[in-house]
Amino acid sequence: MMGERLVMQESLFYEFRLEDHIPSNHLLRRIDRFVDCSGLRQRLAGYYSATGRPSVDPELMIRMLLIGYCLGIRSERRLCEEVHLNLAYRWFCRLGLEGKVPDHSTFSKNRHGRFRESDLFRHLFEAVVQRCLDEGLVGGEGFAVNASLIQADANKQRSLAGADWQEQDHTEAAPRAVRKYLATLDEAAWGAATDVEPKFVSPSDPAAQWTGAMRGPAFFAYADNYLIDLKAAVIVDVEASRAVRQAEVSAARTMLERTAERFGLKPERLAADSAYGSAEMLHWLVEEQKIEPHVPVIDKSERQDGTFSRSDFSYDPEADAYTCPEGKTLTTSGRIVNDGTTRIYLGSTFDCGPCPLKERCCPNTPARKIPRSIYEHAREVARSLAGTPAYERSRQGRKRIEMLFAHLKRILKMGRLRLRGPYGAQDEFLLAATAQNLRKLAELVASPGPQMIQAA
C-alpha cells in the first residue's frame, strides 16, 4: 500500500525538549559540562549602566563565540544565522526554541568595550586552563614554546613604505587599530621588539608585520605564541606579538612568568627551537628561572675557512682565560664590548708570531682574538643537555605544538584574522586557544567532573 505524504499542519500544543534531540556524543554536549559562565555577570557588573534597557545577556554572547571558535565558524553574521537554525547551537546557548538571537553587530560593540576593558577573554581562557589542571591534564614538569604566523586582515596593495607611514601625522581621529598600535610602541612584544624600519606598513593595521618567513610570498602577519604542557599538549598560555624573532622571545618570557604567577606552574625544562637559543634567553632560563633549556644554541663561532674555531681552545673558569692548541694563554682585560654582552680574549704577539700553527689560527692578524659572551655559562649548560634522553623526549614532544597550530589553521579555520590591531589579534588567539583546550577536555576526560569551570 502506497503511503500518503503528510503535509505539515500547525498544532496548538507541542511537547518538544531540545535536550532530547542533542546526541550524547555531540561536540557541544561534551564541551558543555566544562563551561560555567555564571560568574560573568558579576565580573561585568561595573561595566553596565544601572539604568536603560536590559542588554543582551553576556553569557549568551560568550557561548555563541565559543561555538564559532570550536567549530570554525569565522563570520559572526553567519554564526548568528547558524545559531538561529541549529538545535544543538540553541541548546548550548540556552536559547530554547523561541529565544531571540542577537544581531551580529552586538559582538563588535561589546568586544571593543566592556569585554576588552574587563579582560574577559583572558579570564575565560585561564578558567579553562584551571579546569585542565583540576582534571590532571597538566603535569607541570615540561613545557614547550613556539610561534606560528597568522595572516593579518591587511592588503598589500594598499600598504605604504615604512618611512612614508612613520612620517604621517597620526591623530586621535586615526582608525582604532592605529591608535591601539601606537599605544604599544614601548612594549617588548610590539614597538620595542626591534628598531628596524619595516619595509611596508598597512595603514589599516600597522602592527601587522610584513614577512616572508614561510618561504613563500610575503604577507602581513601576527605571531601566535603558544606555551604548552607536554603531558597532554594543553595550552597553558597564549600571547600575540609582532612576527619577528625578538618579539616572540619576549612573548615566551611573558608567558612563563604569567603562568608561574597565575597557576604556580614553573617547569623543570623548556623545549623550543633555535629561535629561542640566544645567549640572553638561555641566561634568563638557566640563571634566573632555573629551567633546563632543551633548546638548540645559536652559535656562530665555528669557522668554515679551515682555521681553528673557538671550540678548539679550552677555557679555564677559575683563571678566566683560554688555552690554545699550543698551550699558550689568551687573557682578557675585562672590558665588555658589543652592547655590553661580550668580552675579548687576546693572545700575545710574542706567542702567536713564531707559533708553528699561526697559519691555522690567525693568518691575517698578529695575535689570536676570541670573543666570549658574558652569558657563555648558560650556553654551555644548553650544549651539555643536547643529546641526553630527556632532551630527545622534549624534542619529540615539541612536535605537539606544531600539531596544535595545524589544528588551529585547518580545523578551526584560523589561517587569517578577522580583527585588527594588537588587541584584536589577542582576542582571537585567546578564544581559539580556549576552544582548543575545551576540545582537549572533551576528548580526554571520560566522565563529567563534580566541579564546574568558573569563568571569572
Image: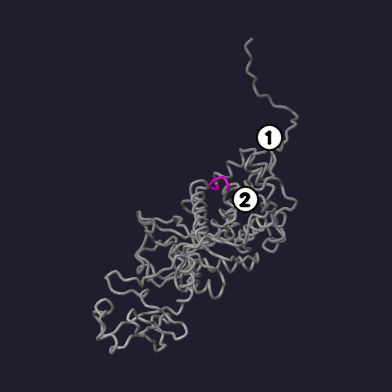
How many numbered marks, from 0 up? 2
User: In this picture, is 26 found above or below 370?
Assistant: above
Q: In front here: 150 or 146? A: 146
User: In this picture, is 223 found above or below 185?
Assistant: above
Query: How far from the left and from the top, in percent, is residue 13?
Result: 75, 30
Choose mark 1 or mark 2, whichever is in front.
Answer: 2
User: In this picture, is 321 found above or below 38?
Assistant: below
Residue beneath disc 2 = 438
Residue beneath disc 1 = 21
Q: Helix, strand or loop at disc 2?
A: helix
Say what amino acid the circle numbered 2 marks: Leu
Give the Cα separation between the discs numbered 1 and 2: 22 Å
Question: Which quarter of the image is occupied by the N terminus?
Answer: top right
Seen in the image, is 261 located left or right of residue 187? right
Query: How far from the left and from the top, in percent, is residue 172?
Result: 49, 69
Q: Is residue 162 rendered magenta in the image?
A: no
Give the magenta-colored segment's residue range.
70-76
* CA neighbours of label 1 inside 10 A, class few (<14), some (14 to 19), many (20+): few
The answer to which image quadrant residue 292 occupies is bottom right
Q: Is residue 75 rendered magenta in the image?
A: yes
Q: Helix, strand or loop at disc 1?
A: helix
The answer to which image quadrant residue 99 occupies is top right
